[in-house]
Image: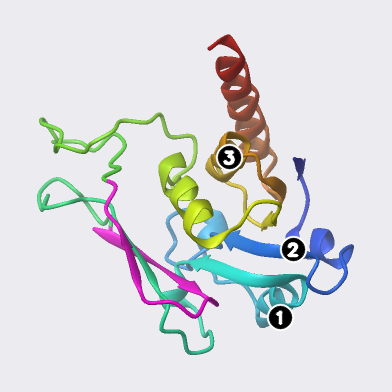
Amino acid sequence: MKITNEDNMELMSRYEDNYFDLAIVDPPYGINIAKWDSEIPKDNFFKELFRVSVNQIIWGANYFNLPHSESWICWHKLKGLNKGLGTMSEFELAWTSHKEKARYFGFTYLGNIKGLNKPTPNYKMQKRIHPTQKPVALYEWLLMNYAKEGDKILDTHLGSGSIALACHNLKFDLTACELDKDYYEAAIKRIKHHKQQIRMF
């Protein structure tokens, strides 16, 4: 597992064409959820991502200008809850380069939402260290359904590090980077803690 605190363009520039088997990325959506989310990635980011990876899964792709795909993934986050959610979307979409049917993952992940008193049946509380943090179970599902043993995985926007925990659990080789130093350090701390917990049991 190679994780660095750097710009993703610098990371990708060091790798040859199709070096990674699968890129799973969650770039800024340009919806101003935070300062770093004020604009979407430039076209050269996607050009470089497609150069260094054979296949791609791109979260928030409904905000980007990407090629046609019939193999979208829907992550349903909020399962039937309509109150107290603020501006959170009830689901998120990911574009994929795969030639498969569209898929659905129904894992409810809400974090700490003001006004929510009762959890839904498949609700799982997780401490959030990043505004767009996704559950480890979602990344495990992606790896089990879209990657194969021995694949090299790339993440250009590490964020909370959930993908790193999933790759560790399923023994995938991950290369990832995070530009923001605070998020990078928080993710590294989370990953180290997870590895220690795994060794204890």
Whole-percent x, y for residue 123 in the image: 23, 36
Residue toward you, 82 or 49: 49
Whether 124 is drawn above or below 52: the answer is above
Residue 31 - label? none
Between discs 3 and 2, the one toward the N terminus: 2
Q: Residue at x 47, y 58 (%)?
A: 145
Q: Is residue 135 visible?
A: no
Residue kind at label 3, given as amino acid type: Leu
Q: Quadrant of residue 40?
A: bottom right
Residue range in magenta is: 89-107
Mark 3 or 2: in front is: 3
Q: Pointers 3 and 2 in contact (CB under 8 A)?
A: no
- Is residue 104 rendered magenta in the image? yes
Label 3: how many Cα within 10 Å (few below 14, some 14–19, many 20+): few
**Residue that carries the numbered disc 2 in the rendered image:** 20
Inter-mark Cα distance, 2 to 1: 14 Å
**Residue that carries the numbered disc 3 in the rendered image:** 170
Whole-percent x, y for residue 82 in the image: 10, 53
Between discs 1 and 3, the one toward the N terminus: 1
- The secondary element bearing badge 2 is classed as strand
Whole-percent x, y for residue 81 in the image: 12, 49
- Is residue 190 rendered magenta in the image? no
Would you say 85 lies left or right of 9 here? left
Whether 158 is drawn above or below 27: the answer is above
**Residue that carries the numbered disc 1 in the rendered image:** 47
Residue kind at label 1, given as amino acid type: Lys
Residue toward you, 21 or 186: 21
Inter-mark Cα distance, 1 to 3: 29 Å
Whole-percent x, y for residue 149 in the image: 65, 51
Q: Quadrant of residue 168?
A: top right
